[in-house]
Amino acid sequence: MRVVLLGAGHIGRTIARLLGESGDYQVTLVDKNEAALDGLATDAVSTVVADTEHPSRLGAVMRGHTTVVNALPYHLAIGVATQAREVGCHYFDLTEDVAATQAIKRLADSAPNAFMPQCGLAPGFIGIVAHHLARDFDVLHDVKMRVGALPAFPTNSLKYNLTWSVDGLINEYCHPCEAIHDGERIELLPLEGLEHFSLDGVEYEAFNTSGGLGTLCETLEGRVRSLDYKSVRYPGHGALMKFLLEELQLRSDPGTLKHMLRKSVPATMQDVVLVFVTVSGLRRGHLVQEVFARKIFADRHGETPLSAIQITTAAGICAAVDLFREGKLPTRGFIRQEQIDLPTFLANRFGQAYQQSRQIESIS
């Protein structure tokens, strides 16, 4: 399969390596920065410098490829998807942005090609897990989805290091959060709904953030009593972010906030990804709960060290593309993450990255 991959950041280059080394993909990796592409070309991966900030100029690069994999910032998703429809390429991305996903869904209506956004960790894998657990209940009560991409060794007051896109991080902290409460779809404020829990002997907090539910509100509406998604952080992080965003009013000046974070908060490759899903309801007349809890750690041992967020995000989108290539997903229109069966995902050569993680047995 011929794939054009847009974006050669930490996630994009990992996707390129995974697809290229598989033997089933010929990848054209595109970035606006020539330096970002240095050393990435192989027999299976070619590199192209192009202006990715203006998706309308990418049509020529896309032509001749079967599929577009978009690893660019979320605000470019609609433009790239529009170009993909015009040139007839199937489309996959990592966006967590709710508005972009809805626009892509409209683009997919009556389209001859397939559109599958939100193929990362959250949204993405977390929705596959939640839907898999939920379908085994006769009456569905509560679905709680919790995900954290965290530094393994927090040392600052935020108890946080940059592990992924600052743009995506601020986006999920600033936009309304979809949920279902008492059977009705609602919007919640980001950074609210604070809760604390202990998992595997470590204390965490979690609070509302935008986008992690993917399309599950639509899929489970009318079936579930409550459904929500929260980001997991170490205790105290949420209060400091509320101070920055609300009291210092940086919510209305995200550019300044992003500059501050990039300048003052170190990035790290030593991270851990936490996935924690609980589903409760009635099964054969009995109230029961099912839990999925995993930790995925950075891989520091290979020739190319990978952070946990690189592993999980790249595995999610590569598995989706691979299952599509194998004919296990629809070939046209809008594809939801929850249309992937969890055992099928985990059996996939890329999805096995989650299977090889450490399952957590004790929850408190």
Image (cartoon, grey):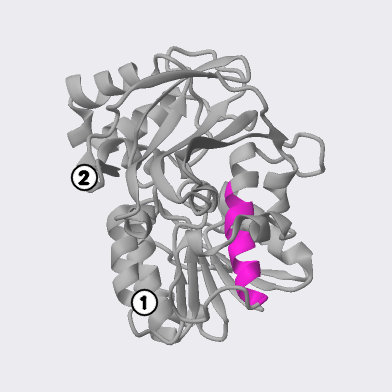
Q: Position of residue 109 (x, y in %)?
A: 33, 79
Is residue 67 visible in the rendered structure shown here? yes
Q: Position of residue 159 (x, y in %)?
A: 48, 17
Mark 1, secondary structure of its residue: helix
Inspect the magenta stretch and tell me whether residue 305 lies in it: no
The answer to whether residue 40 is seen in the rendering is: no
The label number, if any, that marks residue 41 in the structure image: none
Q: Which residues are magenta?
A: 313-326
Marks 2 and 1, how far apart in space? Answer: 25 Å
Please name the amino acid that badge 1 sits on.
Answer: Ala
Drawn side of residue 245 relative to residue 219, left or right: left
Front residue of 161/149: it is 149
Along the line of sight, which residue is nearer the eye, 260 or 25? 25
Image quarter (top left, top right, bottom left or bottom right) of the N terminus = bottom right
Q: Is residue 53 above or below residue 148?
A: below
Question: The disc labelled 2 sits on which kind of residue?
Answer: Ile
- Which numbered dot is residue 186? 2
Indicate the position of residue 116 as horizontal and vertical percent values.
46, 67
Ranked by sequence position, the earlier of labels 2 and 1 is 1
Q: Quadrant of residue 342?
A: bottom right
Predominant secondary structure, magenta span: helix
Identify the residue at horizontal 64%, vertical 76% (top origin): 325
Q: Which mark is residue 108?
A: 1
* Residue appearing at x 30%, y 28% in the figure: 191
